[in-house]
Structure formats: structure tokens, C-alpha cells
Amino acid sequence: QVQLQESGPGLVKPSETLSLTCAVSGGSISGYYWNWIRQPPGKGLEWIGYIYYSGSTNYNPSLKSRVTISLDTSKNQFSLNLNSVTAADTAVYHCARARLGSQNSYYYYYMDVWGKGTTVTVSS
Amino acid sequence: SYELTQPPSVSVSPGQTASITCSGDKLGQKYACWYQQKAGQSPVLVLYQDTKRPSGIPARFSGSNSGNTATLTISGTQAMDEADYYCQAWDSSTVVFGGGTKLTVL
């Protein structure tokens, strides 16, 4: 049973960099897409980006200029860096595993394993 | 950028059928999936590829997707189904979530 666990500072100062790690246990990183998603207090889910096990990445266009997602296969974990944070980046940050495929010429992408989430507050 | 639209709230009586819609341009030409998020918990995948249920998801959860609308249907809704529900699709190599629907069972 694959499990994901987010870790990192719960408090980040404005203008600094938010750094989180997601540890993957009970399974391999190979063959999957590894995602970061966030949820501001009282609001909906916002996809931040993903990294494929090969190392290729893609990011939400609205965050692309500030986001980097990296992978450490030796430690079976992946990480999120979000720079120049403001109060608007305060949220619960989730990591999740996703599968991408195609059938009948259409693509599917779904996240079947999620971490419990970690709360990050941006405040001085 | 691609957008998915959901009603903010849906109410249903216990035992009745709840339907939650998700609208997007030509959504029927993509695959949709659905997540359930109970208060204070992480999202859980309840449907993928429009109609498929992951292991452990009750058969009362079903789905459809045609035209511009995907629909999550919960038959015989139970109190435990009260939660926020999010649709999600894949567009231009990015992930798009709907705004979420709060399902109230009363």
C-alpha cells in the first residue's frame, strides 16, 4: 500500500521560499506522475504541478514563474519549492500520485493516492 | 485556459439520488474524474475515466460524461456521503479542477 507523507516548515515569512518534501513509501516512484496540490482555507483545490518519474515537469501557468518541483529517486521522494511567497500562498499543501493514459483517443489523468496534507502559513 | 464549472452546493435527502454536474468546453471529449473530500480530510478518488470506481468505492457512486457535462451520481445517498466533491480533467498537459460542490444530506 503506497503512502505519501508531506513534511516541511509550517510557517514561512513573506518574500521567502516555501519548501516541502513528499516521502513515498510502500511503492516505487517509477511509472507515475507526482503532484503538488494546495487548498487555501475555505477554498477549493488548486493544482500546482507535477513531475514524472523521468524528471520531466509541468506547472500551473498561474504559478509557473515561482515553482520548481524536483525528484530524488534515491530517497523515494519529491519536493516543492515556491519562491517569493505572500499571504495568498497560505494553504494546506497535498502531494499525490497520478496516472496518465489514453483510451479511445482521449487522455485520462487521475490522482489515486494522496498524502494527508500539511498546513503552511505565510506570515511575518 | 480550460475551466470546469460546478454548482457550489447540492442538497439531497437520505436515500434519494444526488447528481453533481461539472461543465467544460467539450468535456465529453476528455476523461473526467471525481474526488470526495470530507471535512478535515484529504481528497479521495471516487470515480476515474468518467465511470470507473476504484477498489473500495461503493457501487452507489456512478458517473457519465457527454457533450459539455460530466455528472457524478450518488444513488441511495447516505449521511456519510456528505462532503465536498471535485471534478478534474486533463487539458493541454495540465490538470484542471472544478471549483467544488458541497453536498449536504438532510
Image (cartoon, rainbow, N blue to C red):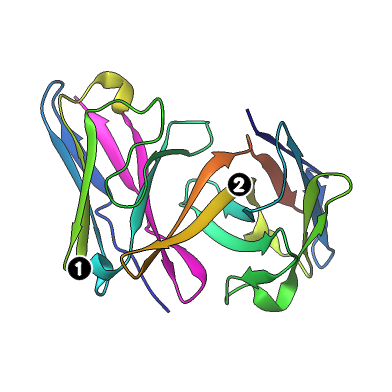
Q: Nearer the viewer, residue A60 or A73?
A: A73
Residue B104: in magenta span: yes
Q: Quadrant of residue B9?
A: top left
Residue A32 shown left or right of residue B86 in the figure:
right
Which residue range is magenta in the image?
B82-106
Q: Position of residue A5 (x, y in %)?
A: 72, 36
Q: Are marks 2 and 1 in contact (CB under 8 Å)?
A: no
**Residue at image mark 2:** A96
Residue A66 shown left or right of residue A39 in the figure:
right
Q: Position of residue A23 (x, y in %)?
A: 77, 40
What's the residue type where badge 2 is placed? Ala
**Residue at image mark 1:** B68
Q: In the figure, B35 relative to B49: above or below?
A: above
Q: Chain of mark 2?
A: A
Residue at image position (27%, 70%) is: B29
**Picture quarter with the N terminus of chain B:** bottom left
Q: Position of residue A33 (x, y in %)?
A: 62, 56
Most distant residue in the front direction: A104
Q: Nearer the viewer, residue A80 or A9?
A: A80
